């Protein structure tokens, strides 16, 4: 994982994921259920989850690899504590009641070996019975429904346009982001690629168990729907450190 992709995306992220706030109540309910007070969101980006969770009363911090994204997030909430680091090998010298890996963040790592390193790192930042919350793609459904598709997002003032084209490769679910921003009378363009590892759920589940996590709840999205292998676009695992 490198920062270049998210340096380019920065403000465009909020335009694409404008409805994220609708998912926060379910996440907050899960955290309350397990008496979470302190939390760390890995890959916290522009704070679409972290800021409303902080407003809901959680003592939450973020970790983000992109300095451009951190700067954009700080413009939204200057008081938020966000650490610059990589989810694969961060070291904060403190523990949290919960660690959150949302928006497919774990599978932005490029191999199961990198994922295993990230899992161990998160394990070390949790106390016994700490919560490890994973939101992942269910790639077979996503590929079946949207392979070789295009989506367009336009800001209300029409000054930012994001075109995303998606398709599956042998190893990755790949998104091309074409970002157009109006500057004075002309548009600039930046292009980047977001790759999600086509991970094996069975391998990941084994890795979680080997690291010392138990999957205690499973859902099909961040609204609390039950998981359906053949129809759910998302795979949500609530894990607990043993």
Image: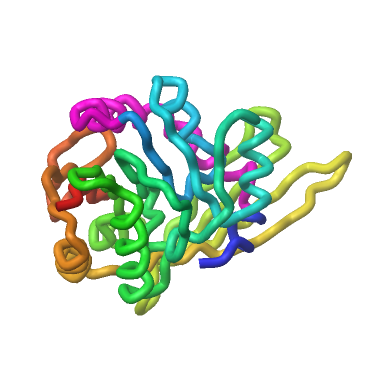
Inspect the magenta stretch and tell me whether residue 137 lies in it: no
Say which residue appears at 40% left-offset and 21% top-offset.
57
Does residue 225 lie above or below 218 as drawn? above
In this view of the protein, which residue sits in the foreground, 89 or 42?
89
Say which residue appears at 65% left-offset and 30% top-offset.
78
In this view of the protein, which residue sits in the foreground, 147 or 58?
58
Residue situated furthest front in the rendering: 93
In this view of the protein, which residue sits in the foreground, 153 or 135?
135
In the displayed structure image, the side of residue 73 where residue 102 appears, left or right = left
Say which residue appears at 18% left-offset and 44% top-offset.
129
Give the total number of marks visible in the rendering: 0
In the displayed structure image, the side of residue 214 where residue 152 appears, left or right = right
Residue 198 in view of the camera? no
Say which residue appears at 55% left-offset and 42% top-offset.
82
Provide residue 216's location: percent of width, then percent of height: 11, 45
Does residue 55 lie above or below 197 as drawn? above
Provide residue 2's location: percent of width, then percent of height: 56, 66
Does residue 52 lie above or below 203 as drawn? above
Residue situated furthest right in the rendering: 184
Q: Which residues are magenta?
A: 9-36
Residue situated furthest bottom in the rendering: 170
Colour theme: rainbow
Inspect the magenta stretch and tell me whether residue 20 lies in it: yes
Provide residue 26's location: percent of width, then percent of height: 27, 29
Residue 189 in view of the camera? yes
- Residue 200, image quadrant: bottom left
Provide residue 179's location: percent of width, then percent of height: 65, 52
Assign the magenta stretch its main secondary structure: helix
């Amino acid at each position: 994982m490198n920062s270049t992709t998210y340096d380019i995306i920065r403000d465009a992220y909020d335009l694409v994921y404008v409805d994220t706030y609708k998912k926060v109540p379910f996440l907050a309910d899960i955290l309350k259920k397990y008496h979470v007070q302190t939390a760390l969101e890995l890959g916290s980006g522009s704070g679409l989850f972290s800021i409303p969770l902080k407003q809901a009363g959680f003592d939450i911090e973020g970790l983000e690899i992109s300095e451009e994204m951190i700067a954009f997030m700080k413009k939204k909430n200057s008081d938020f504590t966000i650490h610059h680091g990589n989810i694969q090998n961060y070291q904060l010298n403190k523990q949290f009641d919960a660690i959150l890996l949302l928006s497919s963040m774990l599978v932005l790592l490029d191999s199961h070996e990198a994922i295993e390193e990230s899992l161990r790192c998160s394990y070390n930042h949790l106390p016994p019975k700490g919560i490890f919350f994973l939101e992942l793609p269910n790639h077979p459904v996503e590929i079946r429904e949207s392979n070789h598709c295009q989506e367009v997002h336009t800001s209300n003032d029409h000054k930012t346009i994001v075109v995303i084209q998606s398709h599956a490769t042998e190893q990755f679910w790949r998104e091309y982001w074409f970002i157009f921003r109006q500057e004075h009378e002309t548009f600039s363009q930046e292009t980047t690629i977001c790759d999600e590892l086509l991970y094996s759920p069975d391998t990941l589940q084994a890795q979680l168990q080997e690291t010392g996590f138990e999957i205690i709840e499973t859902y099909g999205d961040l609204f609390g729907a039950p998981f359906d292998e053949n129809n759910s676009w998302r795979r949500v695992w609530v894990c607990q450190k043993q």
